[in-house]
Image (cartoon, rainbow, N blue to C red):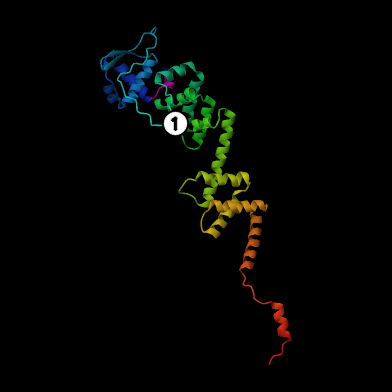
Amino acid sequence: MDKHLKLCGVAHLKVLLLLLRRAGEAVELADLAAALNLSAGDTQDALNYWIGAGVLCALPDEDSVRLTVPSTNAEPAPAFPVASQTPAPRPSGSPPKLRLTSAEIAKLARSSAEFQALLTETEAALGKTLTSSDLATLASLYDWAGIPADVLLTVIEYCRQIGKTNLRYIEKVAMAWQERGIDTLEKAEHYIRESLEADKRQQLCKAAFGIYDRALTSKECEYIRTWFCDYGFDLPVIKLAYERSIENTGKLSFPYINKVLSNWRSQNIRTPEQVAKESSAFARQKAEQQKPKSSYDIDELEAYLAGSTPK
């Protein structure tokens, strides 16, 4: 039990306690599930876990199952399905993914100290006991997808930092990292630093632009990355470009802001003070352009008036 307490969930323990309470009786799956207020699937999963681990032995008895505690010399019995269940259909077009059974997860934990450590560290990082579904997800990522334990723990820590501790979300991030070729701890740490910096830049711009009711699009995120990383601007200058967008277009326009910043970059304008100087010159030029032009020459007119005699 000292070994299995790290691997099993609450449902597993409930099922085992009730079966030990009813030792020697024939127990139907539906009755077992109803007594524990569990789904048939969770109950079946818990049964298979203990049978596969050799803690219990299953003896078929028509539609029920009789479970006994095996002797110390008994070999672990194979998982015995209490009731046949039709597997849920896989959505069309989704890739097949191996999901280990509870018995297979227990076997993996017995044979791999690294996987055992992964489970322990995951529970500590998330601050909760892993469910059977959580265990299956981690086992799939570790054994089927072949993601190293240190990389998985880095994924989990990253997701914890951004407030996403659901194992389904962690699974998506881990698979996305694998597709990007992030397969070592060094690559993972580098990617996390870049991701957290990108998120920080995006949050700063959202606050500066007054965006509170929606997420940024991928194109907008790319604009922000360009302004900070490629152009090398700080937030105060970017905010001035945003204000110019509002003044000249009446709305927030990422392409317009990008055009303003691109022009400032080409003119080597890098600070708010330089922007203010450029704005003054721009305002004077605009005022000159809007001045009404005379259709006559002032000097010629003054010379003419000076030489004329009033009548």
When asked about the image quadrant of residue 55, the answer is top left
| For residue 226, above or below residue 285 | above
| For residue 57, above or below residue 151 | above
Which quadrant of the rendered structure holds the C terminus?
bottom right
Which quadrant of the rendered structure holds the N terminus?
top left
The reply, left or right, for residue 19 in relation to residue 309 is: left
Q: Nearer the viewer, residue 196 or 143?
A: 143
Q: Tell me, yes or no, if residue 131 can be seen here.
A: no
Q: What segment carries the magenta color?
A: 4-9
When asked about the image quadrant of residue 288, the answer is bottom right
Measuring from the top left, give residue 81's x and y in whole percent.
33, 18
Measuring from the top left, give residue 284's x and y in whole percent.
64, 65
Q: Nearer the viewer, residue 127 or 33?
A: 33
- Residue at 46%, 16% (x, y): give it: 110
When asked about the image quadrant of residue 14, the answer is top left
For mark 1, does the 10 Å Cα neighbourhood hold few (<14), some (14 to 19), or many (20 or more) residues? Answer: some
* Mark 1 residue type: Leu
| For residue 253, above or below residue 151 | below
Residue 91 part of the magenta-drawn span? no
The reply, left or right, for residue 180 in relation to residue 97 is: right
Q: Which residue is mark 1?
A: 167
